[in-house]
Image: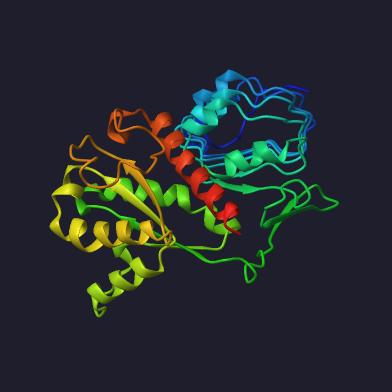
Amino acid sequence: MTYPIEIKGKTKKQVTKLNLSGCKLTSFPENIFEYTNLTKLVLSNNRIKVIPADILKLKKLKMLDLSNNEIKVLHSAVFKLPKLKIPNVYGNQIKKFPKQVFESHLEKIIVGKNPMENEEIEKISLLCEVVADKNQFSSSTIKVEESNKGEVKVEDMKKDKNTEQKHSIFISYSHKDMEWLGRVKTHLKPLARYYSIDEWDDQKLRTSDKWKEEITKALNNATIAILLFSPDFMASDFIVNNELQPLLDNAKSGGVRIMPVFVRPCAMFEESGLSDYQAPSGKERTLIEMNEGEIDRTLMKLVEDIKHFINKNK
């Protein structure tokens, strides 16, 4: 059944949330895209098979619930919605994500009860938080249950990390590259849900801390070091003398894995002693020279390299 939506007492511009769950819909209602101020749209427990490209008209949409439908293909337009944070596609027939998902800014995606391979879900877990069936996603910390009313219940199940080696990730950067520190930490956050890691950068210092002692302690504990390479990084005497050199010395003894990331073009990379260490992207094209999708793919590769290192050293 497809029908136009009419809400008494409100204009289309006044409607920001719409719940059409369990309405026996086989497609999106014909005039739903005229509600351009929607931030939340619930179309769960219907029989919808296709997501139309017109979904792009709902540019303010933050939450889209399409759970328990009959969708086989996730239209790429969904991941082009500029405000979308949480798509829920639980209980459909989806096997793969479109490549546009890596250009999105999702916070969470709910994908349980879909015929997806573990590898497909793990790729997305590097981009955002993934909610999946425990038996579907081998490293998941999330259990999804469906009640007899068709409602989705999400329950955290903390993974036992006591038997794993703890890895400490030290991030060295210039304060002029603070934006890039934030981007790296966003990509690292999902990793901490599934692996036993600590991430340290000087933003964790507090007013009363003896900062040099804290930095030295973090350097000594580091098993992985991410270096955000830029002109300001190399211009900092403190970084070069107090962070870079101790890390290079530690790397020679196998105590730390160094992973440089080129955020801005910079000379003297070979002279710094870092030329032996592989970066997720070459120095010829730095993060600042990339588009958003390329940046996320590069940082995704960084996280994959860290994951590979952790698994190799279990």
Closer to the camera in the image, 114 or 223: 223
Residue 261 percent coordinates (x, y): 34, 42
Closer to the camera in the image, 37 or 90: 90
The image shows residue 11, relative to residue 310, as above or below, that is above
Quick check: can you spot residue 11? Answer: no
Give left or right: position of 214 versus 71.
left
Q: Quadrant of the N terminus?
A: top right
Q: What residue is shown at x 13% (from left), y 57% (from top)?
A: 237
Give left or right: position of 56 versus 43.
left
Q: Quadrant of the C terminus?
A: bottom right
How many marks the image carries: the answer is 0
Residue 305 percent coordinates (x, y): 50, 44
**Location of residue 204 by image quarter:** bottom left
Quick check: can you spot residue 38? Answer: yes
Residue 227 percent coordinates (x, y): 32, 50
Residue 234 percent coordinates (x, y): 18, 48
Give left or right: position of 280 versus 97.
left
Q: What residue is shown at x 31% (from left), y 28% (from top)?
A: 285
**Location of residue 223 by image quarter:** bottom left
Q: Residue furthest right?
A: 148
Task: State how the image is colored.
Answer: rainbow
Closer to the camera in the image, 62 or 13: 62
